[in-house]
Amino acid sequence: MPTRLFALVGMALLLALAALQPWLRFVLTLALATGLAVLGIAVLLRAGQVSFGHALYVAIGAYTVAFARPLVGEALALLALAVLAASASGLVIGLFVSRYRDIFFGMLNLAFSMVLYSLLEKLYWLTRGTDGIRIARPDLFGFALSARDYEWGLFALAAVFALTSGALVARYLLTPAGQALSALKTGETRLEFLGISARRVLYQAYCVSAALAGLAGGLIALATLHVTPLLAYWTHSGELVFVAILGGTANMLGPFLGAIVFELVRVYAAAAFPDAWQMILGLVLLVIVLAAARGLVGVIEDAWMRARRSK
Amino acid sequence: MSRAILRARGLVLAFGGVRAADGIDLDVLEGEVLAIIGPNGAGKTTFLNMVTGYLKPQAGSIQFADREITRLSPRRIVRLGIARSFQIPQLFREHSVLANIALALAAGGDFWSPHRPLLTTARETEAQALLQRFGLADLAQQRADALDEGARKLLDVAMAAALAPRLLLMDEPTSGVATAQKHAIMDRLIPALRQQGVTVVFVEHDMEVVARYADRVAVWSQGKILAEGPAGDVLADPTVRRDVIGLEGAAC
Amino acid sequence: MQLLLLAVLDGLAYAAQLFMVAVGLTLVFGVLKILNVAHGSLFAIGAYTASTLVGLIGTPDLSLIALALAALAVGAVAGPLIERGLLARIYDKEHVLQLLVTFALFMILEDVQKLLWGVKPLFEDAPVRLLGPIVVGDIYYTAYQLVLMPSVAAASLLILVWFLRRTLLGRTILAVTHDREAAQAIGIDARRVYLLAFTIGAGLAALGGALAAPTTSLVPGIGVQMIVLSFAVVATAGLGQIEGAAVTALLIGLGRSFAVYFAPELEVVVPYLLMVAVLLVRPEGLFGRSELRRI
């Protein structure tokens, strides 16, 4: 499947949608940001590991933007800080969680994220608790933009980050360390007896995923201009995992495709069923996992192969 | 006479009450092919596990190329030049045969390069050449989990050989395959490894295989070495024939 | 001094509640080798059901019986439903899929609670009032939290250990835990053992919830807190360690209540600090044994 072509065509399509429907600009920016965080989840899934707590890094990225905003006026600088803070946290926490696999890996991440959630809620003097922090709209590319232009600028930024991150992660996955991720799942013993630290393989991927989630969090904060502890809540982590499985992990397009579908559906469905939204997600997740389906990317790949064969 | 590349002295390791190693002294000579034989539970695999750092002996020492390695981690020991294969092949099941070898080659090289892909032209060529030597060239594009047991065994050793070790330990390279296939596998392995100039230690149950491919034989029994010497002499020894090979026959 | 005593009493009561949930989690893991992420939801559903039933019955004298009935009902319905309907399909699947499935179940059950009981806090303390206060030193404490909850927890531990080690059925469960294939080879039906173990585990979680219900107001999200905390207990003890879970429940319960009195901003962090500290030194947990893979 020509991933690059699909990515560019898809991006052009998004651009057209955003131009036609102004409210979609905001939704699509969020979707692309979410896709970045999900890209990190997908990298970890390659190694057979699932994190139930990556909203932790999204929240760290977002709150970094909120905390730094009074001192920093430029959105790009704020994003850089968000990535830096999330990466630094990932470097430290990763040292610990990369020792573990499967259940422990998933649950330790969940535990860390819930600790942050509680702290964000409780340390009112610092975080304003559940009210969250409002963020004054920063400059973008050095200009104080109108609300409309700022939205456009942020959308473009998210699109560029999505394309470059997708390409960079694809490249990383082709290196020996990237290929060793799925080797981790099937032959950790062999890896060690080839002289390669399995833990370091996972640690590297973990740091990549933390940085991506931090970038996502930064973008989300800049788009919504408001951060709350809910960013770190388990339901948010669950959504990231859900989108990864929905989109499919075989291809870099999966996370973004999944995120776009997810955010578009949510606009309608979450409002219609506020108390059943998680349940719907859970049911869909069950169906995909039990049917061993390869997500939306799998559907597209199959369609593409059929189209080629019938030609 | 060539010098010892591996020197084990007084190795002791007990699991609960069972002494899997009860004072093992053994020299492996540079360039030789040494077979380790003995009944199940005699401590043969335990010896390999101690040499590769997977298990730590409770007493005794292991020297490799005049260097103390007893307390080193498996990864350090691998990097010093001891590779191993496994009784149950440890393959990257979701990867192609070629990628399995390429990962092993990369492990000894630029594994952590952040941008160079696993399958560079150079590495692919090198991997193909290695697969050729081990008779796996036709299977290069197959997924490892689609191979038959014989091919899995060969690939398992080929991955260890890809590290270009000075000493290669093989844990029952022919177990799990039909008798007819055992010789075919060893006919591939031993010349390929000799060509590479690597010293080989292998654990084996099939005496025909031992007689045909080993230069020297060490006989294990209850954590001790019962006899050791040139293959012809040891296999002809009446005690060994009665106590070990006889038992072997019964076990098979 | 009084504060100290209060912290100890609080810790004891909290540890009892924590243990009830953690022991079910660790039992289910020990037998099925699956960590049920939705275990906390069973705690929550047990709690909600108990509160509702106590309210429905209306007679305070019967409220303790209502709690027990609620736990029994939730365990007997949810246990087999989940094990047969869902888990039985995934025993031979990859770990990551098993985790995803129980996580999906968790997402579903969290909303089932909201749909059935709404999001308004629910508070029903008839059982606590029924047992009245008890005086320790010069502190008035509820007998419910100080006597009943720890007693039930201790009884659960003793009965469970006795059941597993001294009865034929219990030994069957242990046999499957240690070596499933060998157990099946001598004619043990592993499927029935899984069903039984999971139902007991679910029942314990529901009982933990039912016991906790009168002491707190129920809101969405109590299940999440419980799964994360009881995982901390179970991980600190070592997965599958039943007596160990009791010890670490005490450790974490006391640690948390001391934090409440002496360093309130650390309250939520202390259990995890304890867990991380233990795991850094002993990755397999305080009472767990590290297993070397056979190669």
Image: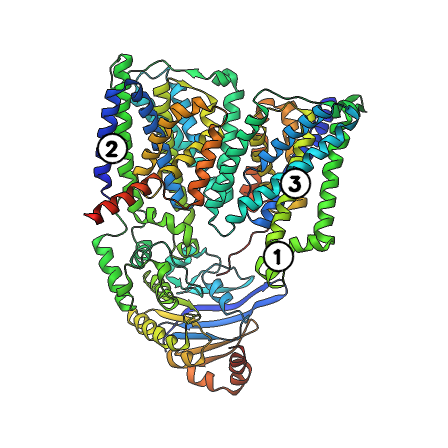
Residue type, numbered disc 2 = Gly
Label 2 marks a residue whose chain is A
The residue drawn where x is 44% and y is 38% is: A285
Left or right of B227 in this view: B231:
left
Q: Nearer the viewer, residue C151 or A5?
A: A5
- Please give the name of the residue rendered at 33% of the width and 60% of the height, measured from the top-left corner: B163
Label 3 Cα crowd, 10 Å radius (few <14 / some 14-19 / many 20+): some
Q: Nearer the viewer, mark 2 or mark 1?
A: 1
The residue labelled by disc 1 is C189
Label 2 sits on a secondary structure element that is helix
Q: Disc 2, disc 1: CB below 8 Å?
A: no
Which mark, by number, is residue B193? none
The amino acid marked with disc number 3 is Ala
In the rendered image, is residue B30 in sight? yes
Q: Is disc 1 placed on a helix, strand or loop?
A: loop
Check residue C76 in the rendering and tell me which mark sits there, or answer none. Answer: 3
Pinpoint residue B44: horizontal percent, then vertical percent: 50, 70
Task: Provide residue B251's location: percent of width, then percent of height.
Answer: 53, 77
Residue that label 2 marks = A10
How crowded pointer 1 is (Cα within 10 Å; few <14, some 14-19, many 20+) is rated as some
